[in-house]
Image: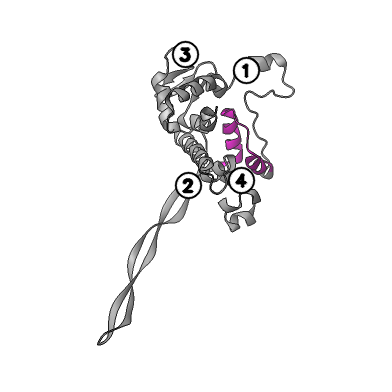
Amino acid sequence: MALLGRHFTKEEHAAGWPETLKPERIAVLQRPYTLGDISGKRLTQAFLQGLNAALASGELPSTIVTAQVVTHHQKVFKGYASRPMWGGDVTEPVYGAAPVYGDKDFHCIAAPAFAAWLAAQGETPSPHVQAWFDAVGVAGAAVPDAPVAGMPAQKHRDRKPSWSTVAMPYMKSLYKAGKYKSAKVFYNALLNRAGVEGSPFSKVKNGLYCDEAGTQVAEGSVGTKWREIRSN
């Protein structure tokens, strides 16, 4: 946790790794960036968008925690004060701003749920995420394409590849042709081309389905691969 000092409060550092984290925290752990690294920050934001999309679709399980937060500030009368002016002091009302609190729901993601979801994306945990997993006693789920120790060779060969392994060459090619500005725009482009010759995707329930991998692909899943898609 010390490695991500500026992203966590002193209280959070003192408490150590929790069982659950908010998506904003997880995004920073999986896609860390340094001060001034604008490109790195954008990648973190893209990963966060992917997490939020997966949470909204139910692809990534979470618990909802309700907390009191400041929703806005309201003007309040604080009394009167005098100030000098030509000809004598003038008494004027003094106003200030008082916080108004309200309930807000937050997603909290447990380490086992994130480990399984991350592996389903064909991605390994960053050193920071692995430190979280180790601290709470969660073994990172095996990435679908990685060999599994002790598994008979035939079973391993019969297992389907991850959707990202199947689709990555196609997605890279499509991105280079269009230079899409965001993962959301790119996902819509994939949807529009689903079922077209050369595309590894078909369209189901207004979403993508990778036939060879045998899995549905949500917008959030594509968001987690945005950095890899854009790389050379």
Rendered view: 130 above or below 10? above
- Circle nearer the N terminus (4, 3): 4
Numbered circle sitting on residue 217: none
Q: Separation of disc 1 and disc 4 at Cα? A: 31 Å
| Quadrant in the rendering for residue 133 | top right
| Relative image position of residue 147 (x, y in whole percent) | 69, 23
Nearer to the camera, 209 or 20? 209
Disc 3 packing (10 Å; few <14; some 14–19; many ≥20): few
User: Identity of the amino acid at label 2?
Assistant: Phe
- Circle nearer the N terminus (3, 2): 2
The answer to whether mark 4 and mark 3 are in CB contact below 8 A is no
| Quadrant in the rendering for residue 116 | top right
Which residue in the protein does label 4 denote?
19
Look at 50% across and 19% down and name the residue there: 170
The answer to whether mark 3 and mark 2 are in CB contact below 8 A is no
Q: Separation of disc 1 and disc 2 at Cα? A: 36 Å
- Circle nearer the N terminus (1, 3): 1
Which residue in the protein does label 1 denote?
159
Q: Which residues are magenta?
A: 110-134
Which residue in the protein does label 2 denote?
106
User: Identity of the amino acid at label 4?
Assistant: Glu
